[in-house]
Image: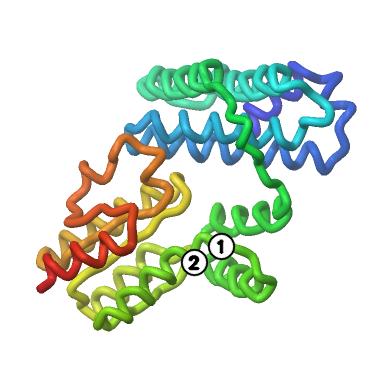
Amino acid sequence: MEASYERESNAKSEYFNSLNNRVKKIIYRDTRYNIDYLYTAYVLDDKKIMNTYAVWLYELMAGIHKQRFTREQTREYVLFHLESIRKTIPDVVSPEKQQKLQEIIEEAQQSIRTYIPSDETKPDSKYEKEIEEYMDCLFHKDTRKAIGMIRRYMDQGMELHEMGARIVTDLFENHGWDSIFLGAAVLVDYILDSVRENHPDLVTLSVSMPQHLMDCEQAVREIRREFPDIKIAVGGKAFESTDDIWKKWPVDIYSRDARELLARADKICA
């Protein structure tokens, strides 16, 4: 991460020297996120994860910089940002991994080049500070702090990723199920401990951000290995940015809709 950031700042030294420390920190943070998504796409062997993220990043930056740069200028900036990572790969990655990683970035860059913006796309950076703080907790796997932040944000009336899972829990409760809601940003070990303690008929895992799909896969496979009779369901926004990666996992249900999930769960757990 440091090598990529240094390469980019050196290549555009005049531009970087004109930036204040806050903006430099944002660029450094974004570099970390980019590499996080790249790593996820690599490990899960799903280029769509990086492609979707790259287009989202371009739209986000276009919204943030719309007063200073044209869309084309922003596009070139994001492409250069990714190119800095691509060119750094041979310096920090073992030879057997280099080609695949570079191919993932090249395809992501092509996704940006061929992307046609929609007039309705209006990225919202309203909660940039909160997002940065929350993402930092997840990056460092500080679950306790992340959950505390979620509660604080809920008190402030913000819409959060946890709400979808909370709604699913309530829906199941209202249809006769006894449900246990573990919350957001839950570590795999905590999920497994809960399964061992409660031995449920169904475990439902929701993933909002693609970089946490690896943790989800680990949880799925460990639950299946230790409890082969327990049914497993997965869903969440993160799966929409993959090429149906759930099909490679030992899950019983994948659903994008809470009511469909309930109907299928009632059927297989009857």
Relative to 214, 81 lies left or right:
right
- Residue 1 visible in the picture: no
**Any mark on residue 160, and which?**
1
Whether pointer 1 and pointer 2 mark residues with C-beta atoms closer than 8 Å, the reply is yes
- The residue pinned by badge 2 equals 163
**Quarter of the image where one finds residue 83:** top right
Question: What is the three-letter code of the residue carrying label 1?
Answer: Leu
Q: CA distance from mark 1 to mark 2?
A: 6 Å
Crowd tier of the residue under label 2, counting other residues whose Cα lies within 10 Å: few below 14, some 14–19, many 20 or above = few
- Residue 214 visible in the picture: yes
Q: Nearer the viewer, residue 268 or 22?
A: 268
Q: Nearer the viewer, residue 234 or 91?
A: 234
- Mark 1 secondary-structure assignment: loop
Q: Nearer the viewer, residue 29 or 253?
A: 253
**Image point (45%, 45%), residue name:** 211
Give percent across and percent down for residue 85.
Answer: 58, 24
Give percent across and percent down for residue 89.
Answer: 51, 22
